Image (cartoon, rainbow, N blue to C red):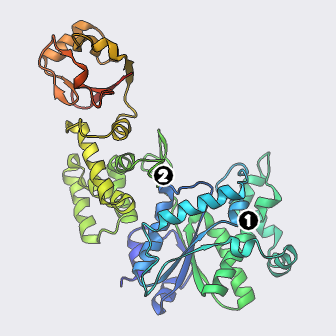
Amino acid sequence: MQDFYKEIEWRGFVHTSTPGVDKHLRAAPVTAYIGFDPTAPSLHVGSLLPIMGLVHFQRSGHLPIAVSGGGTGMVGDPSGKTQERKLLPLDELRFNLEGIQKQLSHFLDFDIKSNPAKMVNNAEWLTTVTLMDFLREIGKHFSVNEMLAKESVKNRVEQEQGMSFTEFTYSLLQSYDYLQLFDRYHCTLQMGGSDQWGNITSGIDIIRRLRSTDAHAIVFPLITTSGGVKFGKTESGTIWLDAERTSPYQFYQFWLNTDDRDAVQYLKYFTLLPRETIDELERAVKTKPEKREAQVALARDVTGRLHGDTALDQAVKASAIFFGGEITEVSDKELLDIFSDVPSCELRKSVFAPEGYPIVELLVTSGAAKSKGEARRFIQGGGIYLNNRRVEEVEKKIALKETIHGKYLVLRRGGRNYWLVKIL
């Protein structure tokens, strides 16, 4: 078993922690929890750092609890938000919670006998406690002055739209979560993002006041890329853990495209690779960055853990297409994933009959060449590929049987300039 605190410290997980938490973790197996927000039926890559925190926690012999916010999700966490969240219908919340639990099972072991992970829904206690009991037991311990001073509240109160009383109570609900988990599972550690520090320490204070004992906290950094962009956001949108929202190929590409400046830190954050391997990959980034060995290791590790070996193999095969790999064996869905961001055009099947469609005209129609003369020069220079096979003849005419599944043609000019032609 590894030393949990020492492990996550060198990996860069520790943004802030309570005094003595490292000694607390070394004294005996500890129970800790992290909450997950059910605002969507899927988590996204922004949730991976806390998930990996629980993974390391379990690997160290401790007992992890993933708390799904079936109760707090009815209110919405105001942290980091500039306006109030839309309240979700209960059926939608339940659907979202099922999706989250399924995704967490790819990372946490819920069946191991020694220290199995638990999935707990805070609706169990938040939807059953009466208002009067909650106010008498919890509310009287909160100072409005202190609550107004919290960053998540102060930022919103100073804005024109302000903050509703519903959101204002969120820190009380999260504190009550910690108290309930302490009582039910002897949970003495809460982890989360650094924006949760105020809410977590309020829970620690409630446990100290009502149970006369210490509880602890570790919060993780909020990740931004070396370019200053919020981690997990791309031009195409959010990178989800659900394969239906973000395909394994797109997920693999997200990690493969990691900036050299971020690759080593992401290996520490998101993989279980040992220090020796990461150190070796760090040297590779410095001495032979063009090989992108760190990015490949990162993409393979994270994609394989989430989506499995078969999906990983398919993603790797699809990625190879951009470097001239065999293109005719991929499915329609994979092909559209691979070329989702390239220019495209549409052609009717009738243009291929009876003699075929001239490659020169196709290059102009698709935008791969500005004129027929330019198209001819590209072909004569050996720079045009049809379905990743070099076009040798300027006068070539394309038959319908040369299309992929009778639906697509892929044009490439040079190394990685692609155009997708859809056959209607």
Q: Which of the labelled discs sits on residue 240, or is there none? A: 2
**Which residue sits at x=54%, y=79%?**
32
The percent coordinates of residue 118 (x first, y second) are 53, 77
Give the image location of residue 159, x and y in percent.
Answer: 76, 48
For residue 71, above or below residue 385: below
The percent coordinates of residue 24 (x first, y second) are 51, 88
- Residue occupying image coordinates x 70% and y 67%: 71
Whole-number angstrom distance, CA of label 2 to CA of label 1: 26 Å
Name of the residue lying farthest toward the right: 132
| Label 2 crowd (10 A; few <14 / some 14-19 / many >=20) | many
Where is residue 326 shown, x and y percent of the image? 20, 38
Left or right of 315, for residue 145: right
Residue 52 in the image: above or below residue 223: below
Q: Which residue is painted at 71% across and 51% down in the image? A: 85
Q: State whether residue 403 appears in this view.
A: yes
The N terminus - image quarter: bottom left
Say above or below: 53 vs 96. Answer: below
Q: Residue at x 67, y 69 (%)?
A: 199
**96 sits left or right of 168 in the view:** left
Q: Which residue, given by chain and number where applicable, does mark 1 sit on? A: 170
Count of marks placed on residues = 2
Image quadrant where residue 304 sits:
bottom left
Please identify the residue farthest to the front as the structure is shown. Answer: 354
Of residues 372 and 395, the one drawn nearer to the viewer in this rendering = 395
Give left or right: position of 204 versus 282: right
Quadrant location of the C terminus? top left
Q: Earlier in the sequence, mark 2 or mark 1?
A: 1
Quadrant location of residue 402?
top left
Which amino acid, by three-letter code, is at mark 2?
Trp
Name the amino acid type tagged 1. Answer: Tyr
